[in-house]
Image (spheres, rainbow, N blue to C red):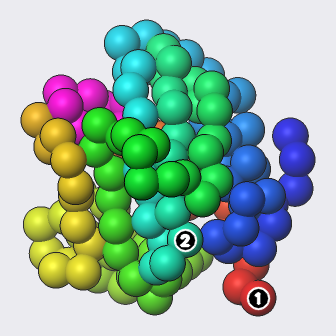
């Protein structure tokens, strides 16, 4: 696996991809998790194309016509709190953030997101496994 870069640059997202793609639990629960997800970290946006629980492609700086079925958008400070080693209350879990942090927003097909809640939760938890370095 590659070393994580600076959050939220492409090398950091590639490190996240590697954690997801090498995770044994994702291999078990992600079999039906094939979709595309947008992650917006402040002004930086990526589209991740998932195939059976694995991140098959990262689209950096996607164009307006690059589709994602659903996604998560928040200012950098919200993401940094979520990714911190000891997150403050409500920032420890992305489901808690969706319900209680107004700046953390789900976009697109929220039903599809919830139909894949277990795999999505594992994937987002893997995002937190390695503390980001802040530049």
- Residue 50 visible within the image: yes
From what the image shows, is residue 119 above or below residue 83?
above
Magenta stretch contains residue 110: no
Q: Residue 58 at what x, y percent from top left?
A: 63, 41
Q: Residue at x 76, y 74 (%)?
A: 6
The residue carrying mark 2 is 44
Q: Residue 12 at what x, y percent from top left?
A: 73, 60
Range of residues picked out in magenta: 112-120
From what the image shows, is residue 95 above or below residue 21?
below
Determine whether the residue tagged by mark 2 lies in a helix, strand or loop: strand
Front residue (pair 134, 56)? 56
From what the image shows, is residue 111 above or below residue 104?
above
Q: Residue 21 at what x, y percent from top left?
A: 66, 29
Front residue (pair 49, 7)? 49
Determine whether the residue tagged by mark 1 lies in a helix, strand or loop: loop
The residue carrying mark 1 is 135
Apparent side of residue 51 relative to residue 65 in the rendered image (left or right): right
Front residue (pair 22, 12)? 12
């Amino acid at each position: 696996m590659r070393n994580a870069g600076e959050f939220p640059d492409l090398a950091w997202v590639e490190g996240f991809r590697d954690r997801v793609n090498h995770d044994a639990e994702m291999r078990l629960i992600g079999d039906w998790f094939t979709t595309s997800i947008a992650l917006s970290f402040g002004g930086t946006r990526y589209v991740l194309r998932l195939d059976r629980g694995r991140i098959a492609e990262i689209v950096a700086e996607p164009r307006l016509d690059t589709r994602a079925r659903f996604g998560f958008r928040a200012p950098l400070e919200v993401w940094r709190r979520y990714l911190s080693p000891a997150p403050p209350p409500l920032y420890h879990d992305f489901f808690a953030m969706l319900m209680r942090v107004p700046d953390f927003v789900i976009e697109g097909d929220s039903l599809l997101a919830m139909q894949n809640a277990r795999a999505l939760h594992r994937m987002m938890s893997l995002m937190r496994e390695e503390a980001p370095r802040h530049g």
